[in-house]
Image (cartoon, grey):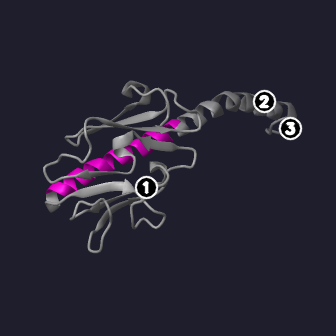
Amino acid sequence: MGIYNRGFTLLELMLALGILALTMMFAVPSFVTVIANNRISTGANDFLSALQLAKAESAARINPVTICKKNTAGTACITAGDWQQGWIVFSDANGNASVDAGEAVVLNHEALDSRITFNGTAGVTNSITYNPSGTTSITGVQILIMCDDRGFADSAKGILITITGRGGVMKATDTGQTTCL
């Protein structure tokens, strides 16, 4: 009986690596697109969840609850920058859209990925306040658009908010907007 060597030859290994490299060449760009699309979808859904939380907390606390762009520490509202820097939801007993002593921060959402821009139309540039009745401080229908470094494409998301406090996430192209805000 002879001794058989059951290993790979160098040629077989090179062929297997070549096939793997060719497969990765097609798979990686698709995977990167999926990750970028999920990043935007997650951010938009997180914001919608914050809106729903603000509405529910307002009814439960029987006083206004505000969602606003946050400062770095997550303790106050700011008017500079865009919603990408994160947001807070807080009990706003006096309805002034400012975190005052004794007003509890209910949610502190971290900043979104730096490749994302997130801005709203005039009525929702800085804050949205929910009243105990479920209505909001906005007038009419307001829109926020979330884009990434790919710009206003099919991947961009729009968040529509009505005066009654209902919100929804959709393709940005379905909101009537034509560019990132």
The residue that appears at 18% across and 52% down in the rendered structure is 131
Residue 60 in which image quadrant? bottom left
Q: Which residue is mark 1?
A: 79
Decide which of 44, 1 is in the foreground and name it. Answer: 44
Q: Which quadrant of the structure image shows residue 148?
A: top right
Which class describes the residues within 10 Å of circle 2: few (<14), some (14-19), or many (20+)? few
Which residue is under mark 2? 18
Query: Tag on residue 2?
Result: 3
Mark toward the viewer: 1 or 2? 1
Quadrant of the image occupied by residue 100 = bottom left
The disc placed on residue 16 is: none
Stretch in magenta: 37-59
**How many numbered discs, if any?**
3
Q: Earlier in the sequence, mark 3 or mark 1?
A: 3
Report the residue at 38% width, 25% height from top: 174
- Image coords of residue 169 (percent x, y): 35, 36
Q: Neighbour class for label 3 at 10 Å: few (<14), some, many (≥20)?
A: few
Question: Earlier along the polypeptide chain: callout 1 or callout 2?
Answer: 2
Is 157 placed above or below 43 here?
A: above
**The disc labelled 2 sits on which kind of residue?**
Gly
Q: x and y percent of residue 95 in the render? A: 23, 60
- What residue occupies the far bottom of the structure in this picture? 101
**SS state under label 2:** helix
Amino acid type at circle 3 is: Gly
Could you tell me how far apart the alpha carbons at marks 3 and 1 are, in whole angstroms? 81 Å
What residue do we see at 54% from left, 49% from top? Answer: 113
Left-right relation of 181 to 28: left
Q: CA distance from mark 1 to mark 2?
A: 54 Å
Secondary structure of residue under mark 3: loop
